Amino acid sequence: MNSQAVAQTQRRPVNVRYRWVQLGIGVVCMMAVANIQYSWTLFVPDLVKTFGWSRASLQSSFTIFIVTQVLSTPIVGTIIDRYGLRPVIMLGGLAAGLSWIVDSGAASLGGFYLGAIIGGVSAGCVNACAVNSALKWFPDRRGLAVGIMAAGYGSGTIFTVLPIAHMIATSGFARTFFVYGVIQGAIILVAGYFMGSPQPGHVPYSTTVIQSTRDFSLGEALHTPVLWLLMIMFACVATGGLMVVAQLSLIARDFGVADVQVDVGLFSMAALPFALMLDRITNGISRPLFGWISDHIGREVTMLVAFTLEAIGMLALATFGTHPAAFIALSGVAFLAWGEIYSLFAATIGDVFGTKSIGKIYGVLFLSAGFASFFVPVANLIQGATGTWATVFYITATMDLVAALAAFFILRPLLRGHYARYPSNLSA
């Protein structure tokens, strides 16, 4: 596409109101499916106590969930690219309900592993549809839009953390799984029915971030070093974040701060639920915040800042996390600085490869999260062998720094070369 064609595309009318409605639909679906990943940590202590399983064996279900989500995403992306969003999001709604209904009746590790597989399919469907929708409706505000969509997943459980924790304590984990499984499945089915994609050329390119005007196929994308580097960086940063998501309750108990009351003046709350609430807020804020920043200063520089902050947060948590107030604040920093990967990486591949085959390309990129998830049970083994979480935090901090430096010193020049070879929105 030449510069004149780009200019014509930029001048075509945009249904501003409707694309924000579409964004809202995606956010609602993401919030509904978020419990499967982010509220899992609330169930772990009671499940371990009731069944007597080891932490590592039970937490393998979390890894299975992530791996299934990751492996299903390329398949889901292919279906989206061919048949559209609606059939996929409806499948995601059915699976979201069934996942926790299966967990409600499970009495063996195999039962929870099956629930994790179904939940992984659900999360893969909903996440892929939501990201696909945001990338296509908002190329001019891609970082912000994908960030808002991802925030629904990262902070959606802020409204359910306390109710779920209360219901587990009063009614048991089985009933809690069943009730919330039905609720989250129904929400996705109703909202997802109205999800759709824009017509080609009806949305504008960015005027500040360079973006390809050529749509790449998956095969073409795989032949570029950019995609492979992004996958490695994604895995590095996702490792620490997924570990904290899955292990926060256990880390708080091992640090001896889980039930310690923290007084902040207006109210007092135990450190663990306080941290969980704060983490949902910071995890949600990080995605649109860093996405919006990247729309103005570029993806690579934003990655450098965010991933470095994440490394600092991990190191500080290892050093000061045994103090209740510090545990709350530093876990919030950790979530603030890792949640943005879901906006920055998705926006970057949309910029680099276009959106015609974005479902498949995003699916392949998301495979990196599967590799990262294997560290979750490994972290338990390292902690058990060393008697401390410090080694785990040191390893993840190092990986964050590697990704931060790679973003600026390797990805940045690679992207310059890529845009020099292919037509872009800011080409003369």
Image: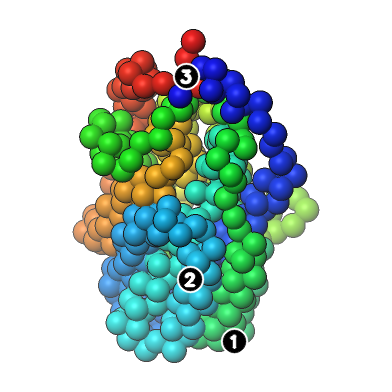
- Name the residue: 31% across, 59% down: 71
Q: Are marks 3 and 1 in contact (CB under 8 Å)?
A: no
| Res 156 label | none
Q: Quadrant of residue 352?
A: top left
Position of residue 115 measured from the top left corner of the image (x, y, whole percent): 39, 77
Q: Which residue is mark 3?
A: 2
Q: Position of residue 74 (x, y in %)?
A: 34, 55
**Three-letter code, disc 1:** Ser
Asked if the residue at tag 2 contacts the one at tag 1, i.e. Cβ–Cβ closer than 8 Å, the answer is no
**Cβ atoms under marks 3 and 2 closer than 8 Å:** no
Q: Residue at x 44, y 35 (%)?
A: 354
Location of residue 30 by image quarter = bottom right
- Say what secondary structure mark 2 lies in: helix
Badge 1 marks a residue whose secondary structure is: helix
Give the distance between the C-alpha atoms of the residues marked 3 and 2, in whole angstroms.
Answer: 40 Å
Which of the marked residues, 3 or 1, is nearer the chain's N terminus? 3
Q: Which residue is pictured at 51% across the width and 75% down the height?
A: 94
* Real-space Cα separation, disc 3 to disc 1, in angstroms: 63 Å
Residue 382 visible in this rendered orientation of the protein: yes
Which quadrant of the figure contains the N terminus? top left
Horizontally, residue 43 falls left or right of residue 328, namely left
**Residue type indicated by callout 2:** Leu
Q: Nearer the viewer, residue 292 or 427?
A: 427
Q: Nearer the viewer, residue 388 or 406?
A: 406
Chain-order first, disc 1 or disc 2: 2
Q: Residues within 10 Å of mark 1 (few under 14, many from 20)?
A: few
Q: Which mark is residue 91?
A: 2
* Kind of element beneath mark 3: loop
In the image, residue 353 lies at what x, y percent? 39, 34
Q: Which residue is mark 1?
A: 171
In-front residue for pair 270/87: 87
C-alpha separation, residue under disc 1 versus residue under disc 2: 29 Å
